[in-house]
Image (cartoon, helix red, strand yellow):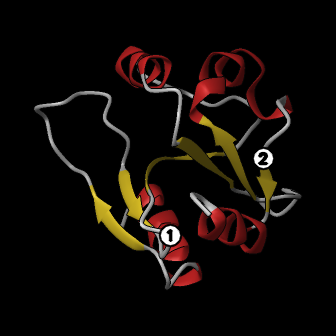
Amino acid sequence: MGAEQKLYQKLKKATPKIIWNRVENLSVVGMPDLLGYNTNCHFFTVELKVTKGRKIKFSPHQISFHVTHPKNTFILVQTLGPRSSNRFQLYPGSGILALQATGRDLEPFCLGLDAIRDFLYQLGA
């Protein structure tokens, strides 16, 4: 199982009140990995990224998607390694250019799976 698949499993387990659809297609390049639907009847997307350092890699198609769809899109980053504090960070999709430029130095919306879960549960409320 790949790193992003493991991240998806952790997110899914941490957010049982969200219906997740994993998007895996070659037709719409750049489409985020997940389509979520919460109990507030609110749809949103999440791009999953796993990194070992501060830099986060995005394809030009992923950047284009988030630039053209700045609302209700998010980027979930997991940092691997024993010295990684704040292993899980959630960023707005609208900040993808800054995130690409500065990496994890960019201030996230949320730190930690519990805070991310609570944030996603409240979307659309």
Counting every numbered tag in the picture gives 2
- Residues marked 1 and 2 touching at CB (< 8 Å): no
* Residue 29 versus residue 122 in the image, above or below: above
The span from disc 1 to disc 2 (Cα, nearest Å) is 20 Å
Along the line of sight, the residue nearer the viewer: 94 or 40? 40
Q: Quadrant of residue 35?
A: bottom left
Query: Which residue is at a point 55% across and 27% down the rendered structure image?
Result: 57
**Of callouts 1 and 2, the N-terminal one:** 1
- Residue 32 place in picture, x, y as percent: 38, 41
- Residue 9 place in picture, x, y as percent: 45, 74
For the N terminus, give its image quadrant. bottom left
- Residue 111 place in picture, x, y as percent: 81, 58
Crowding at label 2, few (<14), some or many (≥20) Cα neighbours within 10 Å? some
Along the line of sight, the residue nearer the viewer: 118 or 105? 118
Residue kind at label 1, given as amino acid type: Asn
Crowding at label 1, few (<14), some or many (≥20) Cα neighbours within 10 Å? few
Along the line of sight, the residue nearer the viewer: 45 or 54? 45
Query: Which residue is at a point 41% across and 16% down the rendered structure image?
Result: 64
Q: Quadrant of residue 101?
A: top right
Q: Quadrant of residue 30?
A: top left
Residue kind at label 2, given as amino acid type: Phe
Q: Is residue 95 left or right of residue 71?
A: right
Q: Which residue is mark 1?
A: 40
Query: Which residue is at a point 62% across and 64% down the rendered structure image?
Result: 125
Kind of element beneath mark 2:
loop
* Residue 104 versus residue 35 in the image, above or below: above
Kind of element beneath mark 1:
loop
Q: Which residue is mark 2?
A: 109
Query: Which residue is at a point 45% across and 66% down the rendered structure image?
Result: 8
- Say the numbered circle drawn on residue 88: none
